[in-house]
């Protein structure tokens, strides 16, 4: 899989791409992540990428040319373009699964007061990671890339993915490790019983109970 991220702040991704699971996936050739500074595609001598708003208003908007020119340079017939914007569809696990099957994904990070409305015509998807405002699309791009990459075959053990939160519209079950007793809090007896059938039943019940209590909105 190839992920291209269009941003004005490529150094923000340095740590994200060089640590832990993401780094291993890149080193193993499972995913190729390119961070592209679309300022390089500005047609202006000073490489300006933003400008004042027609009709007036506070702040500056991203101009069309740098993003259109960048997309023209990297897009293929297998590309899908994602515009990261507060008014997009709220990102969820089912979308992560859909994105993980795309061969070439392009993420456009917005900044400043927003972007020229014509940039929307490039997008196959408009995505928001939540009902709040960030200074730019870089953090959403990292979150989306992380959620996609970990789903790619060979990145994480498939059995670990099957029981995660939001699979089958359920949150994950409670988990424990050593010590068995700590500050008066003990591991549930069923988990140390050695009876795998009972453990499976308990975990299923806990997933359902936890989801009803914490996220009733996702219960079918």
Image (cartoon, rainbow, N blue to C red):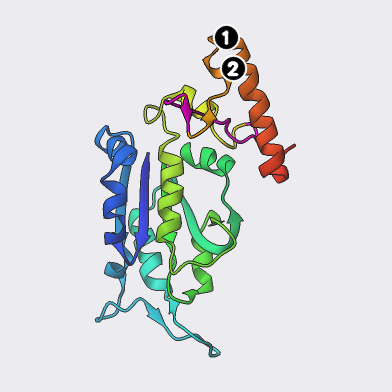
Please say if 78 is above or below 160: below
Q: Residue at x 36, y 65 (%)?
A: 69
Q: Residue at x 47, y 38 (%)?
A: 100
How far across and how far down the image is residue 141, in percent? 42, 54
57 sits left or right of 138 in the view? right
Q: State which quarter of the image contains the C terminus.
A: top right
Q: Which residues are magenta?
A: 168-182
User: Residue furthest toward the bottom?
Assistant: 56
How far across and how far down the image is residue 119, in percent? 49, 67
Q: Residue at x 56, y 36 (%)?
A: 165
Of residues 140 and 205, which is closer to you in this image?
205
Mark 2 = which residue?
190
The quarter of the picture where residue 104 lies is top left
How far across and how far down the image is residue 212, in percent? 72, 38
Dominant SS of magenta comes to: loop
Q: Are marks 1 and 2 in contact (CB under 8 Å)?
A: yes
């Amino acid at each position: 899989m190839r992920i291209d991220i269009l941003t004005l702040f490529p150094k923000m991704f340095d740590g994200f791409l060089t640590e832990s699971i993401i780094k291993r996936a890149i080193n193993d050739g499972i995913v190729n992540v390119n961070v592209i500074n679309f300022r390089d595609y500005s047609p202006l001598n000073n490489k300006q990428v933003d400008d004042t708003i027609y009709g007036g208003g506070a702040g500056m908007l991203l101009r069309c040319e740098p993003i259109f020119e960048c997309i023209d340079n990297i897009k293929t017939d297998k590309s899908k373009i994602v515009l990261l914007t507060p008014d997009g569809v709220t990102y969820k696990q089912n979308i992560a699964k859909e994105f993980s099957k795309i061969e070439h994904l392009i993420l456009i990070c917005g900044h400043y007061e927003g972007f020229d409305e014509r940039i929307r015509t490039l997008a196959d998807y408009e995505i928001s990671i939540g009902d709040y405002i960030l200074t730019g699309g870089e953090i959403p791009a990292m979150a989306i890339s992380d959620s996609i990459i970990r789903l790619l075959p060979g990145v994480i053990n498939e059995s670990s993915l099957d029981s995660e939160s939001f699979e089958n519209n359920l949150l994950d079950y409670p988990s424990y490790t050593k010590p068995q007793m700590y500050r008066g809090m003990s591991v549930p007896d069923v988990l140390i019983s050695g009876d795998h059938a009972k453990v499976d039943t308990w975990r299923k019940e806990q997933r359902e109970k936890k989801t009803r209590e914490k996220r009733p909105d996702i219960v079918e």
